[in-house]
Amino acid sequence: MLPIVNIRLNDAPADRELMTVSGWDPTIRDRFESCHSIASFAPTAEQYCKAFTMCCSMQFDPNNGDKCQTNEQRCIPLEEGGADAVCIQRNCTELVTTTTTTTPAPIIEEEPINTARSTPREIK
């Protein structure tokens, strides 16, 4: 199993700007964790990159699912071991956040229906 993957960005400001996501953006999907968990079983950095790239490519489908329009991916084996890996998809269908209600449902107590009268009726 490969050591933890090294994530390094180039020193060029333009590259840093592309790779930095400030805050949460509902139109961006970072698939690194998912693809890393699959590729991390590879015995070499080259095989890791092959699996990582395949995973990233398979998660990119501009016509279905998240409908992401751009796929920014790379995986470069490093001499010291590990890899420089990125899998970010942009211009995706916006994620909608939802909240779960924590208020308990109201308790409705129904009174029993009694069809028998308390006083007997006289039959003639």
Image (tube, rainbow, N blue to C red):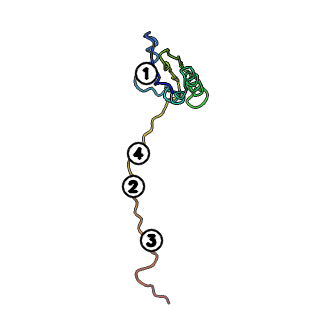
Q: Which comes before the other along the chain, label 2 or label 1?
A: 1
Report the amino acid beneath label 4: Thr
Report the amino acid beneath label 3: Ile
Is residue 31 or residue 80 the one in the foreground?
Answer: 80
Marks 2 and 1 sit apart, C-alpha to C-alpha, by 43 Å
Report the amino acid beneath label 1: Val
Q: Which comes before the other along the chain, label 4 or label 1?
A: 1
Q: Tell me the mark number nearer the camera, choosing from 3 and 4.
A: 4
What secondary structure is marked by label 2?
loop
Q: Residue at x 57, y 32 (%)?
A: 65
Left or right: where does residue 58 sit relative to residue 113? right
Image coordinates of residue 119 in percent, x first then y, are: 40, 83
Q: Tell me the mark number nearer the camera, choosing from 2 and 1.
A: 1
Residues tagged 4 and 1 counted as in contact (Cβ below 8 A): no
Q: Tell me the mark number nearer the camera, choosing from 3 and 1.
A: 1
Say few, some or many: other residues with alpha carbon within 10 Å of mark 1 (under 14 / 14 to 19 / 20 or more): few
What secondary structure is marked by label 4?
loop
Q: Which comes before the other along the chain, label 3 or label 1?
A: 1
Image coordinates of residue 123 in percent, x first then y, are: 49, 88
Q: Which comes before the other along the chain, label 3 or label 2?
A: 2
Residues tagged 3 and 1 counted as in contact (Cβ below 8 A): no
Which residue extends farthest left?
Answer: 103
Say few, some or many: other residues with alpha carbon within 10 Å of mark 2 (under 14 / 14 to 19 / 20 or more): few
Disc 1 target residue = 21
Q: Tell me the mark number nearer the camera, choosing from 3 and 2.
A: 2
Report the amino acid beneath label 2: Pro
Q: Which mark is residue 113?
A: 3
Q: Which mark is residue 101?
A: 4
Disc 2 target residue = 106
Residues tagged 2 and 1 counted as in contact (Cβ below 8 A): no
Image coordinates of residue 14 in percent, x first then y, are: 45, 11
Which residue extends farthest right?
Answer: 63
